[in-house]
Image (cartoon, helix red, strand yellow):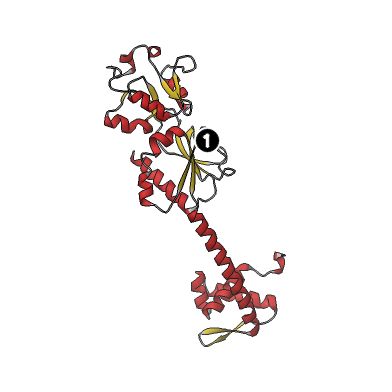
Amino acid sequence: MDWKDIPSLAALRAFDAVARSGSLSGAARALNVTHAAVSQHLRQLEAEFGEPLARREGQGMVLTEAGHDLAAALGEGFTRIAEGVTRLRARQVARPVVVALTPSFAESWLMPRIGGFWTAHPDVEVRLVPGIGMSDLRRDGIDMAIRFGAGSWPGLRAEPLTPNRFAVVAAPGYTKARSLADLGKLRGHDWFFSRAAMEQRLWGRAVGVDFDTVGAREMGSNGMVMSAVRAGLGLSIQDMALVRPDLASGQLVSLYEGDAEGLGYYLVTRPDPLAPGARLFRRWLRRVAAGD
């Protein structure tokens, strides 16, 4: 199809509105444009085809024979376009929202809270894809990701989701110390961290612990780490957003809290517009994170 052989789509759309409404003013209201704009489009088409397409009759417009032929073709074409758009939008609403995120964030932050989203939006399916690798959002069909870092991922939009703070935590019965200074020699204690939460290595350096040289116990997931620490087996260093409920309930105590120096969890999306379900989930994430 050669688009140069087809008149302006705006003019064709205006004529279709005239044919459906039976007047220039009705078409103008339907398209949210001026009466003059519709009249100009009609004149443009009549000049293009070299014959009148509609004539004024009373307060309305009556189509000529050529106008009827064009209106029938446009009506069929625009109806098929509208049906295709409706089907595509319905598919976007129905498809699951795919979210890539770190296992530690999924276990400790998202899962205890996501029930609120399911209750509010039971028709929106959310598919979580935990992993420590960096997903290619477009290639892997990911709507959004929750990533740990400094917020800079080329070609993607990133917004802070949780405050950039961390804490050294332990069970209340593990030690009577309530600060790192009270605790004494850091190397003399059992540390737990997850191989799926490499940010803990960075925070360790901030408090003077190098997990590459200290004999820390590496667990398969952050959930296992938290279970070990709650059981009083040792210390861990965690994002504040993940341990705040345990600190509030008294299951854990904080021996140190620090600034992660720009590091934190970010909500990452492609520059493209999000599907309706993904927009709902992003809005919910923002609201819940802001209330923490």
Secondary structure at badge 1 equals: loop
Residue occupying image coordinates x 48% and y 49%: 96
Check the image and report above or below for 114 versus 217.
below
Amino acid tagged 1: Ser
> Is residue 257 in view from this perspective?
no
User: In the picture, which quadrant includes the N terminus?
Assistant: bottom right
Check the image and report above or below for 221 versus 114.
above
User: In the picture, which quadrant includes the C terminus?
Assistant: top left
In this view, the residue in front, 200 or 44, is 200
Residue occupying image coordinates x 29% and y 28%: 251
Q: Is residue 52 left or right of residue 135?
A: right
Q: Quadrant of residue 164?
A: top left
Q: Quadrant of residue 13?
A: bottom right
> Is residue 194 in view from this perspective?
yes
Q: Is residue 67 left or right of residue 89?
A: right
Q: Is residue 70 left or right of residue 232?
A: right
Q: Number of labelled discs?
A: 1
Check the image and report above or below for 284 versus 13.
above
Give the residue at mark 1: 152
Residue occupying image coordinates x 49% and y 17%: 212
Q: Residue 277 in the image: x percent, y percent?
A: 46, 52
Q: Residue 229 in the image: x percent, y percent?
A: 35, 23
Q: Residue 205 in the image: x percent, y percent?
A: 45, 19
Residue occupying the far bottom of the picture: 58
Check the image and report above or below for 43 versus 155.
below
Residue occupying image coordinates x 54% and y 77%: 20
In this view, the residue in front, 140 or 177, is 140
Q: Residue 222 in the image: x percent, y percent?
A: 42, 29
Q: Is residue 165 left or right of residue 30?
A: left
